[in-house]
Image (cartoon, helix red, strand yellow):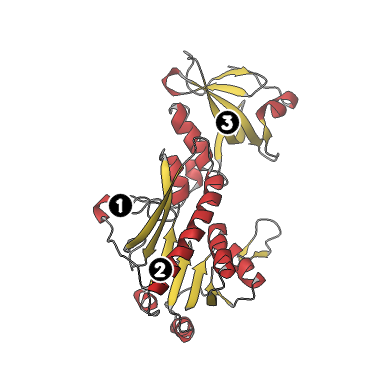
């Protein structure tokens, strides 16, 4: 079976690597164009492109599929199937119509929940206890196609967005391999989504970063871990801005207003939060500094408590 693969970030690279291990015939790999990196503005290849080149696969990086030449180039590959994982582009109907066996996508949520660009992070930000990956047929509308199969997994209480992404990448790779095998056998079942139950997971922005200390302990923990590795939760401490990488609930109550600094001990900095509760900041990064334990930072940079 001739497969065209489409994807961009690490989760998609993991799935591509697994397809290569299964010796599938991948006739082309589509990924987003190289983008300037933050340091030196050198062009950075996507993780999918890097993986594809390691395996000697032909890489295509069109800006749009609405270009007739791009469409004809893809059509000339004569794919039996298009497999897509976090590509970052919506495919027009004429592209979806090219492969005789259709286009399948691995989406990192339990559809129809969390359609969109940031399902992994929003599953944490929304306080979900479970997530998963969905194999689906692609449709013109984003993440709205018929479901093939769903693989579920619990979200651990302090698991970060970065850690969950790695786990879902492996789970998604397994599901993609299984899905392709079932397509080859002709054993696929299609289940239309319950569109009225759909929720959405938009792209993350830096507007989500500032911590609102009036929130509950659970909400603050979920915000911090859900925004790792980007854009990372932030707060001001002693007049300085910090990125916050880890917080932990603290037992006991306080009458101090949310955001007040209560105590600096051997484990971290304790801050008042909503409902009269306390949170401990245990890992942070000062502007221009490096990520480190809070207690180590404040050992060299004393802070006045409120």
Seen in the image, is 110 located left or right of residue 46?
A: left
Please name the residue shown 36% across and 51% down the image. 200
Seen in the image, is 60 located left or right of residue 38?
A: left
Q: Pick the residue in front: 15 or 95.
A: 15
The picture places residue 284, in percent across and down from the top left corner, at 63, 34
Please name the residue shown 57% across and 58% down the image. 10
Compared with 250, 44 (above or below) is below
Label 1 neighbour load within 10 Å: few <14, some 14-19, many 20+: some
Asked if marks 2 and 3 touch (Cβ < 8 Å), the reply is: no
Seen in the image, is 35 located left or right of residue 69?
A: right
Mark pair 1, 3: CA separation: 36 Å
Q: Secondary structure at mark 2?
A: helix
Compared with 99, 163 (above or below) is above
Mark pair 1, 2: CA separation: 27 Å
Label 3 neighbour load within 10 Å: few <14, some 14-19, many 20+: some
Q: Secondary structure at mark 3?
A: strand
Residue at numbered disc 2: 182
Please name the residue shown 35% across and 50% down the image. 113
Q: Which circle's residue, 1 or 2, is located before the other in the chain?
A: 2
The picture places residue 236, in percent across and down from the top left corner, at 58, 31
Query: What number is the disc on residue 236?
Result: 3
The picture places residue 91, in percent across and down from the top left corner, at 40, 71
Is residue 62 in view? yes
Q: Which circle's residue, 2 or 3, is located before the other in the chain?
A: 2
Please name the residue shown 69% across and 41% down the image. 288
Image quarter in which the C terminus is found:
top right
Query: What number is the disc on residue 198?
Result: 1
Of the two numbered discs 1 and 2 in the rendering, the one whose residue sits closer to the viewer: 2
Outermost residue, top side:
255
Task: Please tell me in which quadrant of the rendered image residue 219 appears.
Answer: top left
Q: Which circle's residue, 1 or 3, is located before the other in the chain?
A: 1
């Amino acid at each position: 079976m001739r497969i065209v693969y489409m994807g961009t970030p690490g989760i998609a690279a993991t799935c591509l690597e697994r397809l290569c291990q299964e010796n599938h015939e991948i006739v082309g790999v589509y990924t987003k164009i190289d983008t300037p990196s933050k340091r030196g503005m050198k062009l950075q290849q996507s993780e999918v492109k890097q993986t594809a080149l390691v395996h000697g696969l032909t890489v295509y990086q069109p800006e749009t599929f609405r270009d007739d030449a791009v469409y004809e180039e893809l059509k000339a590959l004569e794919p039996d199937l298009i497999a897509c994982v976090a590509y970052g582009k919506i495919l027009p109907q004429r592209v979806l119509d090219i492969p005789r066996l259709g286009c399948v996508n691995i989406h990192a949520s339990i559809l129809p929940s969390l359609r969109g660009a940031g399902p992994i992070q929003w599953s944490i930000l929304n306080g979900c206890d479970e997530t998963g990956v969905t194999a689906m047929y692609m449709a013109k509308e984003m993440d709205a196609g018929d479901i093939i199969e769903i693989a579920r997994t619990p979200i651990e209480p302090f698991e970060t967005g970065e850690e969950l992404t790695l786990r879902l990448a492996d789970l998604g790779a397994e599901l993609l391999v299984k899905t392709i095998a079932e397509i080859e056998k002709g054993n696929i079942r299609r289940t239309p989504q319950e569109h009225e139950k759909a929720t959405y997971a938009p792209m993350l922005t830096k507007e989500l970063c500032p911590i609102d200390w009036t929130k509950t302990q659970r909400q603050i923990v979920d915000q911090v871990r859900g925004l790792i590795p980007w854009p990372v939760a932030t707060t001001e401490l002693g007049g300085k801005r910090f990125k916050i990488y880890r917080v932990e609930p603290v037992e006991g109550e306080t009458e101090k207003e949310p955001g007040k600094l209560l105590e600096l001990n051997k484990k971290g900095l304790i801050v008042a939060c909503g409902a009269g509760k306390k949170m401990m900041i245990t890992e942070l990064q000062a502007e221009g500094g490096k990520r480190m334990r809070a207690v180590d930072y404040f050992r060299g940079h004393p802070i006045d408590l409120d």
